[in-house]
Amino acid sequence: MRDYAGGAAGRGDTIAAIATPPGEGGIGIVRLSGPEAFAIADKVFRGRTRLVLAPTHTVHYGRIVDPRTEEVLDEVLVLVLRAPRTFTREDVVEIQGHGGFFVLRAVLRAVLAAGARLAEPGEFTLRAFLHGRLDLAQAEAVLDLIRARTEYARRFALRQLAGDVSQAVRGLFEEAQALRAQVEFELDFSEHDEGEIDRGEFLQRLEVLRRRVGDLLRGKSVARLVREGPAVVLTGRPNVGKSSLLNALLREERAIVTPIPGTTRDVVAGELELAGFRFRLLDTAGLRTTEDPVESIGVARARKALREADLVLLVVDGSSPLTEEDVEIARYVASLSVPAIVVVNKADLAPRLERQRAAELVPGSPVVSVSAATGEGLGELEERLRLAFVEGEAWEGVLLVNERHLRLAEEAEAALAEAEEAMRRGATLDLVALPLRVAAERLGAILGIDVGEDLVRQIFSRFCVGK
């Protein structure tokens, strides 16, 4: 069991909590974990089998009663799970009853009256961590999986929970520890010439390790996209159909559409679930010079949204020739160094804009013809959105997307670069040993190795009670 001096989790008692979300549902679960889980459950369970004698991983039908009055509280199925083949590696009982709030609360009160303690937030997962069932990265993945709001967030969390990240980081940690040990041995026994480090070979190992840590940091470019979703900003001159396009993509009337230029005066947002992402679509005021003070504020906000965008949809009207406004806005978009797609709207009307001319607006950007009115071309536009974010090397292999992990890996990479530079210039080994120790500590902290109680408490306090 990992050393953890503080907190209720270190008591070794039996905890209980409702493990399913509050509200009405077909099934609700009260979970117990600890050395007295079976004995406590027997005090409230009335069935054919005493749970304390039941084999592991078996299901038993019966009723839950108030241990003080014998009042029947619910009709249930009870799962018996014996240590160590459980999530917490302790004896576990799961009482599966009806999912009503008052029913579950009554069952929980009965279990607490029988001797269990109400679990603290995240205490079940904390016990799994303390008993070595999960390392800290895997424990955090449990929370990331629960909070995942997109398919990609779910996939990354599940891979982290399965140990992909831990396995990769552990290999780096062990190599950093090996290099550190080699240097510290040399410092301790420097009077023996035969133990001298081969600086060329050592430097090569340092370089390889730093690059491998850098490979994990490729996830930094996608971490925010996975958590928050890409910000896609629609821009263009007034009345080219930006709001109509937003509504068409969202399949709902989110933005007001009128033939009057300047109708959109603020940023209108909507979310589109596509290809495992939660795209944040932002319809902005048409970019133009205006004397209207309210519209001017909208234009300023539109420019701010464009500067912060992950992708810009430059919308032009395909039923009319390009205007000087179109060209000026395109120049502004091109100056932002933000990926863009030129969207030629109103494809259902007689075309008056050549595709080649549209392609020249933002050189190198794809052009898609659509009709917000009929839906023509929306499939191609959605495919372009997908390709803009889920293709390329940034998504391959094991990636770090957790903010804490990324910060620690960045610090480890910087420390390794410092050690590498010291070794390259022939510095004394104590100037190599210190950054190597920092690198090893940061990599170990990702896994929960030698981390402080405050950090552990902070991480698990973010969990809900019952997990």
Image (cartoon, helix red, strand yellow):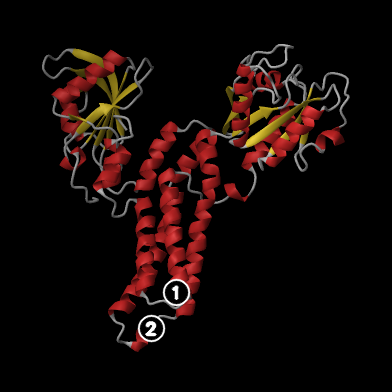
User: Which picture quadrant has residue 295?
Assistant: top right
Q: Residues within 10 Å of mark 2 (few under 14, many from 20)?
A: some
**Horizontal placement of 253 versus 318: left or right?**
left
Residue 181: horizontal and vertical position, in percent?
A: 34, 71
Amino acid type for the residue under numbered disc 2: Glu
Location of residue 367 with respect to 260 vertically, above or below = below
**Horizontal placement of 273 versus 77: left or right?**
right
Nearest the camera: 179 or 78? 179
Residue 57: horizontal and vertical position, in percent?
A: 31, 36
Location of residue 257 with respect to 164 vertically, above or below = above
Q: Residues within 10 Å of mark 1 (few under 14, many from 20)?
A: some
For mark 1, what is the residue?
423
For mark 2, what is the residue?
196
Of the 4 image quadrants, the one containing the C terminus is top left
Residue at image x 45%, y 59%?
414
Mark found first going from the N terminus, 1 or 2: 2
Amino acid type for the residue under numbered disc 1: Met
In this view, the mark in front (1 or 2): 1
Proximity of marks 1 and 2: CB atoms separated by less than 8 Å? no
**Horizontal placement of 247 versus 81: left or right?**
right
Residue 369 visible somewhere in the drawing: no
In terms of secondary structure, where does tag 1 sit?
Answer: helix
Location of residue 257 with respect to 18 vertically, above or below = above
User: Which picture quadrant has residue 44?
Assistant: top left
Location of residue 182 with respect to 209 vertically, above or below = below
